[in-house]
Image (cartoon, rainbow, N blue to C red):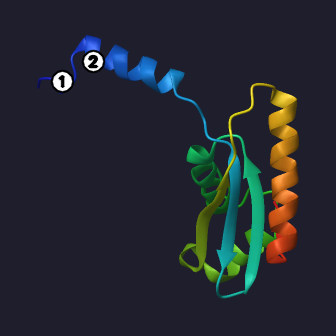
Amino acid sequence: MVNAFGKEDRKAALAAYKERKSVVGVFVVRCASAGAVWVGGAPDLDKIQNRLWFQLKTGGCPHRSLQAAWSAHGAESLTFEVVERLEDEDLPFARAAALKSRVSHWVAALGAEAV
């Protein structure tokens, strides 16, 4: 069987993946059945839902109320939404402070629980 990607194509794709910029931002998880909302911040919005859903599937989510909603109502009752993408910050502490501030804003605005 012939590989769809040549060796050079694979190397280029891997290099591009490693060099991509992650998008920092705020996300919301909602459970329609429970009427609950959770807000969190992530240094990489492209990966956070997969990580969170894996934790929930395996029962290892550190956020007890979110895990309880998943267990009681199932995966299909939860939705994931990105609500804000933050501008690039060169300094890690500035990025962390901006993310913390925006998460606090969304928690208050939505009457949500922070995750």
The residue indicated by pointer 2 is 9
Task: Give the percent coordinates (x, y) of residue 76.
Answer: 53, 77
Query: Closest to the observer: 94 or 8?
Result: 94
On the image, which quarter does residue 79 sit in? bottom right
Please name the residue shown 27% across and 11% down the image: 8
Question: Callout 2: few (<14), some (14-19), or many (20+) C-alpha neighbours within 10 Å?
Answer: few
Please name the residue shown 18% across and 27% down the image: 4
Question: Callout 1: few (<14), some (14-19), or many (20+) C-alpha neighbours within 10 Å?
Answer: few
Quadrant assignment for the C terminus: bottom right
Task: Give the percent coordinates (x, y) of residue 21.
Answer: 57, 30
Disc tally is 2
Task: Give the percent coordinates (x, y) of residue 114.
Answer: 84, 63
User: Identity of the amino acid at label 1?
Assistant: Asn
Q: Earlier in the sequence, mark 1 or mark 2?
A: 1
The residue indicated by pointer 1 is 3
Task: Give the percent coordinates (x, y) of residue 28.
Answer: 69, 65
User: Identity of the amino acid at label 2?
Assistant: Asp
Q: Relative to residue 2, is residue 61 depicted above or below?
A: below
Q: Is residue 11 visible?
A: yes
Please name the residue shown 22% across and 23% down the image: 5
Question: In the structure shown, which secondary structural element does the residue marked by tag 2 occupy?
Answer: helix
